[in-house]
Image (cartoon, rainbow, N blue to C red):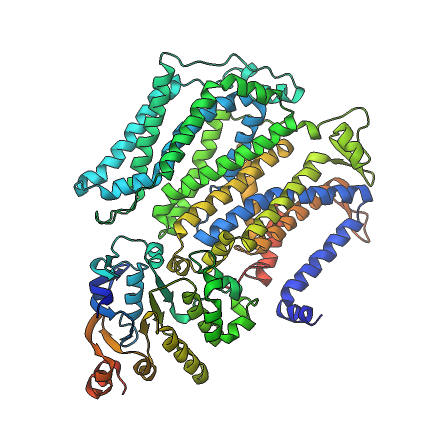
Amino acid sequence: MNGLLVSLRKNLALWIIMGVLLALLIMAIRGMPTKDWVITLLRSFSAGAVIFLVASGFSLIFGLLDVLNLAHGTLFMIGAYLGWTVFVRPDTFVDLLPLGALLGSGFMLGPVWESLSLASRLPERLRRILPWMGLAAAVAILLYVLPHYPITAWDLDRYDASPVTYAYLADQGLFVPPEPEKFEGMAPALGLATVVFASLLATLSLTSLTQPILAAEVRPKMRWQPLAAFAAIVAVGLLIFAFNDALTNFLLGLNTTWLFFIAMLVASLTGFGLGALMESTLIRPLYSRPIYQLMLTLGLSAMGIELVRAVWGRPEFTMPKPALFSGSGDGCPATTLAGWLEHQCSTLLILDGRVRVYNEIFIPLVGILVLLAVWILLKRSRLGMIIRAGVQDRQMVEALGINVKRVFTLVFGLGVGLAALGGVLAGPSTGLGSAMGDTVLLNALIALAIGGLTSYPGAAIGSLMVGLLQQFIIKYGAIGIPIPFTDIVFKPTPPLVPASTVLLMVIILLVMPNGLLGKKE
Amino acid sequence: MSNLLEIQDIHTFIGQYHILQGVSVEVPAGTITALLGRNGAGKTTTLKSVLGLTPPRQGRVVFNGRDLRGLRSYEIAALGIGFVPEHRAIFRALSVEENLKIAERRKGDLQKRQEMIFSLFPDLERLIRLSGGNLSGGQQQMLAVARALVPENHLLLIDEPTEGLAPVIIESMMKAILHLSADTTVVLVEQNFLVASQLAEHYVIIEEGMSVKQGKMADLVNDPDTIRRYLGAA
């Protein structure tokens, strides 16, 4: 009780703001029939969860690394498109797997490359030029090999083979995989070996580029683990290549609920890898130059959008809902959870409101699970301890004997992985389009400004507030707000939705310049 | 007697500023060596250069017979060098226990040494669950020293341990440093000459980024001219 009073006095502004907002929320709820506010609340949680997945990663990265990753929204979008590919075109996914494994295999040898590049006694000038030549050669080799590499994919030029069509076919359960491609004009063994070679060349060059040039006598010990990891990943790639058809048929035969979970997993892991790669190659040289980081991430964001347009096309399409959430007909909409499980309905009746199970229950659930998982990671694990300490003082963490650089890479990967997971989640509810990343990033930034830029609970509260405000305004746009003492019914128009969140942010920042839970600088 | 740490004519730049312009220090094993000098002379930068936090551009640092050039800070620290930074840089968002735990290099480091740590700083045991930000200045300084004692360190770099502390706490801090110097070599940056002269056996005076004088503390105490010239006070 006493503690509560102290906290009340200390954070008076915070409690007043929360009180006012809660009162507003209650007023907003009371102005609606029951079934409307139940749905609106659930939709707010759904929107908030997606925003949170982007905002939390963004804030982790900014808190620890001081990097404002403006490409975060784009990575969210890429996650969505990757998830879509796994879910709708498992055959394409299986074709891409070995390619990804072989291309990534070189990264496993990072420590070996490091000791090699340190040990090199080449003249200074050669040491500067060689990595670039190596990189160019690797790109040239890949440009030659990749057109021969067999990837069964969609065709943007033919409507009947476009992503839009495949999304529709998958939704109807009519998808039949096209005839798989084969290596053309090139022996498969040669093709695969060339890809591995290009990967080795590229990673060696990248390591030499990003490593500071150090004295030759300081040579790290060679270890066998990187070699084993390299061999393992190449072996996995080759195995998948050999048993391509079997794996494809297995995935096609799976219940789409499982396939959806695989899509979530693949997108998160790929996001993690992309983030780690981005940090260790592009961001790392720019730690002392914040403006360049901004320009870099902004540029990457634009490149990512164009890349998505080039690969998946400009038209927007949706991702079908997994089987668990798409049933209709007999027994639907379900009235109880048991009934829902039995018929796997897409909708559920709660207090007279028809709730879409995927959008309004599954997404918030995943959001809460991620919230808790990351919270436990931050509070209970050694990595979390290092992250929380590093947010305050990186140098001191390093001085304790901890490799902060590796933690940076991990955290960047984690943040991007969360965003990619959010993208997959959003796919079936809001659809896929090349603008989806920008919208969510803007919302996430507003949520973080409201909650406090580097505060993890702040990210959650801010995201929830943005979600609530947007969804209630959308709903009131449909039913209208009667203005007291007049006959006028005010209906908020769609442009008011983003404007209202910005307004909320401005008001909160005027009262609490560091956001609700932000620390004073 | 062999030297545990040898700093050989290092030059360190911070940005474009040439901060250290030739610092050489010899630290015999098992002693306390005090770095003396005015504000901004480069004492803190010398400590940070040893740890590679501000890597020297010229010269070299040899620890335990090993050249530290090219090693990253975390690798240098892992060789057995503990650092107590100035301004009580503990982790405010972490609890006292976590502040100690994060310094573990091997699992169980804290458990092995917590008895020793808590006998030096009994306050910390009582406050173990509190977050670092809620400690008083003196308690934070104790925590910062305690943190450096958690892993097995051969050398402790302690920067301004008594800065801004009440006299009673300064005294217990001095006792703690004397106690731990029994089995660890210490390099101490200390503005308070009275404190430094009671603790250290050797001294090095740093002036405008250069080491200008070093020797036995006992000789310096009896040399008021040098004290007045470089330290400004007797």
User: Horizontal and vertical percent for residue B156?
Assistant: 34, 68
Left or right of B166 on screen, residue A251: right
Tell me which corner region of the image, top left, top right, bottom left or bottom right, holds residue A42: top right
Which quarter of the figure has residue A41?
Answer: top right
Residue at 75% across, 29% down? A345
Quarter of image, res B201 = bottom left
Q: Which of B203/B185 is in front?
A: B185
Residue A406 drawn at (x, y percent): 41, 48
Please report the residue visible at 52 percent of the width from the left and 12 percent of the height from the top.
A179
| Percent x, y of residue A516 | 60, 59
From where the camera sits, is residue A432 visible?
no
- Can residue A488 be seen by looking at this rendering? yes
Q: Residue at x 41, y 62 (%)?
A: B151
Left/right of residue A407 with respect to residue A495 in the rendered view: left
In-front residue for pair A7/A382: A382
- Taking the spot 35% from the left edge, 14% from the top edge, the residue there is A186
**From what the image shows, is residue A68 above or below residue B213?**
above
Q: Quadrant of the N terminus of chain A?
A: bottom right
B79 sits to left or right of A46? left
